[in-house]
Each structure stands twice: as C-alpha cells, then as structure tokens.
Amino acid sequence: MDFAVRLGFGRWAVLTFVMALTACGGDSTSSTSQDHAAEHLYATNTAGQILKFPLPLTSGSRPSVVVSNHPFNAAIAVDANGTIATSDRAGHLAIYNQPLTSSSAPAAIFNNDTPATNDATQYLAFSTAGDLFAMTGNFATVGQINLFAHPLSSASTVSQVITNPSVTTAFDLS
C-alpha cells in the first residue's frame, strides 16, 4: 500500500478511535454534572482549538465550547474526571481542568521528552488512576511511551519510559 494512503488511513483510524474513546470516558454512576466527560465529545483541530460537542451527536452538531490552545494539536485525551490533556507538534503537553469554557487556559504545561526533535506527541491516554501516557515517534523513527504520574502539574516529568521496536507501528494508545 502506498505510504500516503497508509498515512491517511492511519490518521483517519486514529481520529475515529480517539473520538470514540473520548466520548466514552467518565464515570457512568454520576450523570447529573453539566460538564461530565461522558456527556461530551472532545476533539482538537489544526487551528489549535479544543472543541467540546454535547452528546448525542447529529449531522448538524456544532461545538458548544471552542477553546484556543497550542497550534497544531496532535492528540487529546480525557480522564474519568473530565481532565483534558492535549499535545502540540513540538512535544509540549497541556492539562485543562473542568469546567471547560471558551476562556479556559491550561492548568499546567510541561514537556514530553521526545526521542527526536521532529517527533510530535502523537497519542495520549489516561490510566484509571489519572496517570498520563504520551507516545512519541512517527513512521520513520522508533517511538517511546512516557508515563507521567498524577497529580499533573507544570513541574511534571517522565516517571517511566516504555520503549519497544514495535511502538513505531502502533496507531494509538488506549
């Protein structure tokens, strides 16, 4: 298969998977909160924005909140408490707390230690404990998964590194 086709399909698959996971996040025992993570879908776009969509989605759905963020967002993840992590293509991670509004600013910004200067933080995922996993790398370089232990702050640093040659073929974290 042609590289451009594989890359395009991979990005589509990742976006679909991340959006599905993001929409599923949250604690199903509490649905009364207006900002509950399970009641919204969160996405990022190349304009550097976080988009918050109310569920259920329809063909006419529009974001209820648009937040300016770091340019060229590469990934987004939401934990069960609604904490949002985003990344840019320069290896920076930003953490947003709820409630998310159009004037929200990151509660924390810190660096993801990348293996090469051109590698973006491609994929993010939270553990049930609130730890953040950030994968770096692209199709041409060996990636790594960095673990940031909670609580996350601007002083957060990598607490564990997972490296494996097969990480280069991973499409996402979950």
Image: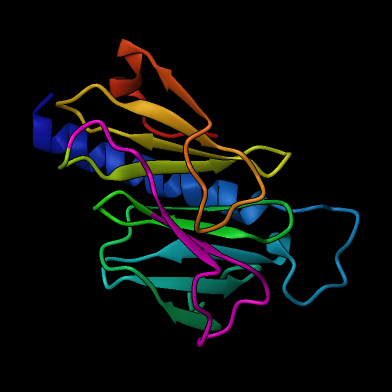
Q: Which residues are magenta?
A: 93-116
Q: Position of residue 45 (x, y in %)?
A: 33, 66
Q: Position of residue 14 (x, y in %)?
A: 39, 42
- The structure's colour scheme is rainbow
Please identify the quarter of the rendering in which residue 148 is found: top right
Q: Is residue 130 left or right of residue 123?
A: right
Residue at 26% across / 45% down in the picture? 120
Q: Is residue 142 left or right of residue 158?
A: left
Residue at 33% across / 68% down in the picture? 70
Residue at 69% across / 62% down in the picture? 37
Above or below, 82 against 89 in this view is below
Residue 94 magenta-drawn?
Answer: yes
For the C terminus, give its image quadrant.
Answer: top right
Q: Position of residue 2 (x, y in %)?
A: 8, 28
For the N terminus, give its image quadrant.
Answer: top left
Query: Magenta: predominant secondary structure element?
Result: loop
Residue at 51% across / 86% down in the picture? 102
Residue 80 magenta-drawn?
Answer: no
